[in-house]
Amino acid sequence: MSLNERDKSQLRSALQEAVIKCSERCLYQSSKWAAELLNAIPEAEVSLDDSRLSDASSGYASTVIAPNTDPAEAVLEANEMSNYLLAKSLFDCREYDRCAAVFLPETTLTGIVSPKEANATPKGKGKGKSKATASNSRPRNGQAIPKISQRSLFLSLYAKFLSGEKRKDEDAEMVMGPQDLGTCKNKQLITVSRVLDTWFESRRTEEGEYMDGQGWLEYLYGMVLAKEKNEESALFWLVRSVHMFPMNWGCWLEMTSLITRVDDLNRVMSRLPQNIVSFMFHIHTSLELYQHDANLAHSLDQLLNIFPSSSFLMTCNALLSYHAKDLVAAEQNFSHLLSLHPYRLDSLDHYSNILYVMNARPKLAFLAHLCSNVDKFRPESCVVIGNYYSLLSLHEKAVQYFRRALTLDRACLSAWTLMGHEYVELKNTHAAIESYRRAVDVNRRDYRAWYGLGQTYEVLEMHAYALWYYKKAAGLRPWDGKMWLAVGSCLQRMGRNQDGIKALKRALLADSYYEAGSSFESAADSMRGDPEILLQIAGMYDTLGEVEDAKAYMEMCVAQEVGPAGESQGETIAIHRDSPGGGSDDAGEGGGRGTGTEGTGVTAATSKARMWLARFAMRTEDYATAGRLANELCQDGVEVEEAKALIREVRSRTESAGGGPP
């Protein structure tokens, strides 16, 4: 993908307009996103006497107020400018109720909403409603919405919505306190929803279409419906919004939160406008779904060619490596991003997770100090500091900082999940389960929380529950061997060995999928397996009485001691695996494996497999093989005493059979 100078000029104009319009409506995060992209487009060098200078500058929008192309709306906006500036100033001061009252006083809102109480049928919650329909939602004998511009109506209702969110946080109990049930609701959702319902119904034609929309009120309506768990209807309005104004990144993020599977993403993409923002949405949502294929990397490279210094796209690139388990590349990408934007705290919680797994204590300490100096009361800063204390095994201090992050933002997913890991370390299983459950409530796509729930129930020996949660995690990360290993191990404990074998074979296949695509391991070596998994599969075959299959997997387990060329294990780089362990960060228990070009060397698993093979040789009277394997076990230094006893037994049986010593 490449853009000529004309396309870049149009893109700059669209992004500048987005910055201004989002800022007018106090959508500050969307405004920041657009401004960062705008400044990431390389500027063409233009001399002052260049005749194209006037043409280029004429494409830029006003830097004060974005003009409205709708004449009727433009007149309304001009007439209410003084009230609008007052409302926006009050919003900026976080006086949300006062802001809303400038255009929609409480008496007006009561007149619009109250008559509906007797006539309205409650909205269905769930996925059964495709879009808002209206004969029951039109107010009867109620007060009409004042004739104000869409910009002012949006600002008033958005302020009312945030007022409800603020009051919800104030009414909530202390995080994870005895009364914190997570049941507090935004009490303004009904008011905002009904006003918007009324406004849209007044503009609905006989054909069922809605006239005169600009995309902003559609976005707010979709956001409110999503909060009410009316997801299909919310998606309908959000899609309408991005068709009308595609540069509102907040609307795309709301759609991302409603998509839980790749199939859902592909289905939604067919309904979206095809432009550069939908291209970014596809990449961002794919990363949220833990995708990391070559097509995604190619698409990201294309966007980086257009926005080479975009912090948003550089973060996506780092997360792409993170999901592909290429932690060294992910760490380098985040480190480069931090050097370019040292005061940017967005997504640094992911960076701290990577440093935690790599056991990079000095770098994590530096990151914690940096975040604390920039803004110690940002949720990301608290998560980074909590990860640092967790790495020092100061779990109580880690919990304290994760709680602080949640006090600042109860929707901070990383804090809920990581706090669950810390409670596991502290042996507080009840609190761990509650933390993981709250993480799942925030984001159902978080495989780490599902895995943590499975792990905690397994500690409680409630294997049926653990299996259900492990399967949820494996469904979200189907190519993560650790997920399938957990499923297989749980099935083994439940006595379902056949199903367990299938799950563990899937774990081997998943590990080879990651390793073949890794920069550390060659495709030729990708068929190698984890000795522990191979030993576990062999043991289940042995339990089922399928001795030949058990023998084959025991031999495969022993074969992992040497590399493809048969050499012994040398020095290797420890590569940590990205799966949550008890009390660890979302990326695992911190265990390592070799680079894959060399063998694992002697391990407890390979020694157990060799002992099993030696005893099997004894049962089949293959004394020469049994003696050789027993001698190897003596050199291993793992099960020496049993090996010596086996050698004596081999010698005794050989002599009694009339042969010489082995």
Image (cartoon, grey):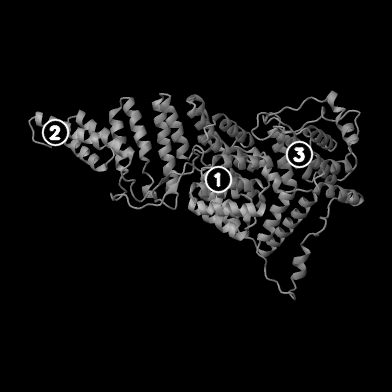
Q: Which residue is mark 1?
A: 389
- Looking at the image, is mark 3 or mark 2 earlier in the sequence? 3
Mark yes or no: residue 152 visible.
Answer: yes
Residue depicted at x 78% and y 54%: 20
Where is residue 154 drawn, in percent x and y?
A: 81, 43
Few, some or many C-alpha atoms within 10 Å of disc 3 (few <14, some 14-19, many ≥20)? some
Where is residue 505 drawn, in percent x and y?
A: 40, 35
Q: What is the secondary structure assignment of the residue under circle 1?
A: helix
Q: Which residue is mark 3?
A: 166
In the displayed structure, would residue 647 be above or below residue 283?
above
Residue depicted at x 90% and y 42%: 147
Few, some or many C-alpha atoms within 10 Å of disc 1 (few <14, some 14-19, many ≥20)? many
Q: Is residue 13 left or right of residue 345?
A: right
Few, some or many C-alpha atoms within 10 Å of disc 2 (few <14, some 14-19, many ≥20)? some
Q: What is the secondary structure assignment of the residue under circle 2?
A: helix
Q: Is residue 80 left or right of residue 524?
A: right
Q: Measure how far apart labels 2 and 1 are at the Cα level.
A: 57 Å
Q: Measure how far apart labels 1 and 3 are at the Cα level.
A: 30 Å
- Looking at the image, is mark 2 or mark 1 earlier in the sequence? 1
Give the amino acid at mark 2.
Arg
Q: Which mark is residue 651?
A: 2
Q: Measure how far apart labels 3 and 2 are at the Cα level.
A: 80 Å
